[in-house]
Image (cartoon, grey):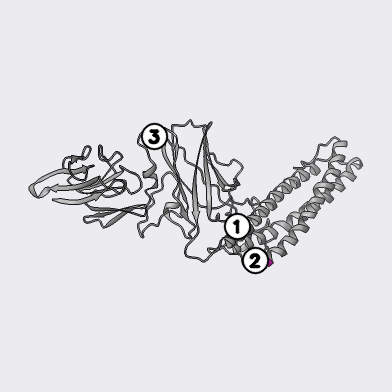
């Protein structure tokens, strides 16, 4: 019985047929191929078990000679036009496959008793080479700028991509596959993502940031690249870099960067002295009437605010370190009239540092309800604006711009105060400390 006929999408003279003789108690596979319009046929079943009779064969519509065969005992794949086959079961149950269809980059399988199954991204399969070099970076499929999340967004080594209670959507970010040789424990890899103009959007590493401090109300750690031998999977969530916090300062907010706008992006994987580069494209969400000008304004506004917030917290953290240095130094000053004037000036500067810090951040809050007793300060309000401006529909509204203007005016005043401390008060005190042989407060 001829169960399926597949005409090659790449060569009209080539066709495949899947035949069965199980009604004659013959369970051997029966796949055949012609390259001359059916004048001659060649049996192509090497690698398929003798009892796995075949019901369907399909050729990929992008990569020539990439074949999928549905048998009584599961799915098989051939890279070379049917010369050899190998099991391609993945998480598909062992069940008869009655039909296969390749549609919009997906492989759809009809099973007997197990419903429909979909392998929803053939881009990796289409690029993969069975005898490839030990190091490879595959081009990620283009991705739509969508909202929501998926279990497949996880990048961890042990992710399952499954949910016991509901169906699982495709990943909502750029899925990056890379193949590695066996690396030493001390070897590390990096991934850099840049926009079409060459500007760095985000970078990832297999090495954890040693300076990262985890605390309630702070940013989460950056995801790490896996570096296992063989195939590795990582998902870029389309976002710009995570903004830093002020350690131990509780802010009920998100520190995530905004999602990158539609456009082409390059991905560069660095492994030791080797560098591999590919590209991908973020596509506009077709559900929203967002124009290119809307995306540009949104991106520029969000990036500017995130850059300022980063600067604010870096300055806050730097000044807080100076504050602690000065407190320690003043506590160690010898008693006596010789250092009384120096101590007085040091205490005056310490007071200015504390006042500036108290205007920037609220250090008394340690949990969500603490805001009832300890009001949020400037950087929290700025971060709230960033979160409120970010939207599933990337378009900046006028109230956000009005609020940004107000906060930027406050930030200008705070920066001016910081500049006076950094450029005037601190150098003046440091000179006197050096002259007294007591060292200095770090300027940077």
Q: Residues within 10 Å of mark 1 (few under 14, many from 20)?
A: many
Which residue is at 87% across, 48% downward? 345
x and y percent of residue 5 in the render?
Answer: 21, 51
| CA–CA distance in space, label 2 to label 3 | 51 Å
| CA–CA distance in space, label 1 to label 2 | 14 Å
Does residue 162 appear left or right of residue 25 in this picture? right
Q: Where residue 180 is drawn, which disc sits there? A: none
Q: Residues within 10 Å of mark 2 (few under 14, many from 20)?
A: some
Q: Where residue 132 is drawn, which disc sits there? A: 3
x and y percent of residue 52 in the render?
Answer: 18, 44
Residue to which mark 2 is pinned: 400
Mark 3 or mark 1, which has the lower sequence index? 3
Tag 2–tag 3 contact (CB < 8 Å) = no
Does residue 278 appear left or right of residue 40 in this picture? right
Q: Is residue 375 magenta?
A: no
Please say whether residue 73 is visible from this viewpoint. Answer: no
Does residue 146 appear left or right of residue 196 in this picture? left
């Amino acid at each position: 019985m001829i169960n399926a006929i597949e005409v090659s999408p790449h060569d009209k003279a080539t066709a495949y047929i899947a035949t069965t003789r199980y009604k004659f108690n013959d369970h051997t596979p029966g796949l055949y191929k012609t390259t001359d319009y059916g004048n001659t046929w060649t049996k192509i079943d090497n690698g398929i078990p003798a009892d796995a009779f075949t019901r369907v064969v399909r050729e990929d519509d992008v990569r020539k000679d990439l074949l999928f065969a549905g048998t009584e005992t599961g799915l098989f794949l051939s890279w070379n036009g049917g010369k050899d086959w190998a099991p391609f079961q993945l998480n598909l149950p062992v069940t008869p496959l009655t039909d296969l269809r390749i549609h919009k980059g997906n492989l759809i399988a009809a099973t007997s008793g197990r419903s429909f199954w979909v392998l929803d991204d053939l881009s990796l399969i289409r690029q993969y080479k069975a005898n490839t070099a030990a190091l490879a970076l595959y081009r990620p499929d283009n991705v739509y700028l969508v909202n929501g999340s998926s279990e497949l967004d996880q990048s961890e080594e042990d992710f399952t991509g499954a949910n016991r209670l509901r169906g699982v959507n495709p990943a909502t970010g750029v899925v990056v596959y890379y193949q590695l040789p066996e690396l030493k424990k001390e070897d590390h890899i990096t991934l850099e993502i840049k926009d079409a103009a060459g500007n760095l959007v985000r970078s990832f590493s297999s090495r954890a940031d040693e300076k990262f401090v985890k605390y309630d109300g702070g940013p989460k750690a950056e995801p790490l690249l896996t570096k296992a031998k063989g195939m590795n999977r990582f998902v870029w969530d389309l976002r710009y870099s995570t903004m830093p916090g002020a350690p131990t300062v509780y802010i009920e907010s998100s520190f995530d960067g905004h999602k990158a706008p539609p456009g082409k992006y390059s991905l560069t994987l660095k492994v030791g002295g080797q560098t591999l580069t590919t590209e991908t494209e973020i596509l506009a969400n077709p559900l929203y009437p967002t124009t290119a000008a809307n995306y540009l304004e949104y991106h520029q506004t969000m990036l500017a605010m995130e850059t300022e917030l980063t600067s604010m917290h870096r300055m806050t953290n730097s000044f807080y370190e100076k504050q602690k240095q000065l407190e320690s130094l003043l506590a160690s000053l010898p008693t006596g009239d010789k250092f009384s004037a120096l101590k007085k000036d040091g205490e005056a500067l310490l007071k200015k540092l504390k006042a500036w810090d108290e205007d920037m951040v609220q250090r008394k809050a340690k949990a969500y309800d603490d805001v009832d007793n300890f009001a949020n300060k400037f950087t929290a309000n700025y971060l709230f604006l960033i979160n409120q401006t970010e939207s599933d529909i990337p378009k900046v509204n006028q109230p956000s711009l009005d609020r940004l203007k107000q906060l930027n005016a406050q930030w200008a005043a705070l920066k001016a105060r910081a500049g006076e401390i950094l450029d005037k008060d601190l150098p003046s005190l440091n000179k006197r400390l050096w002259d007294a042989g007591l060292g200095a407060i770090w300027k940077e």
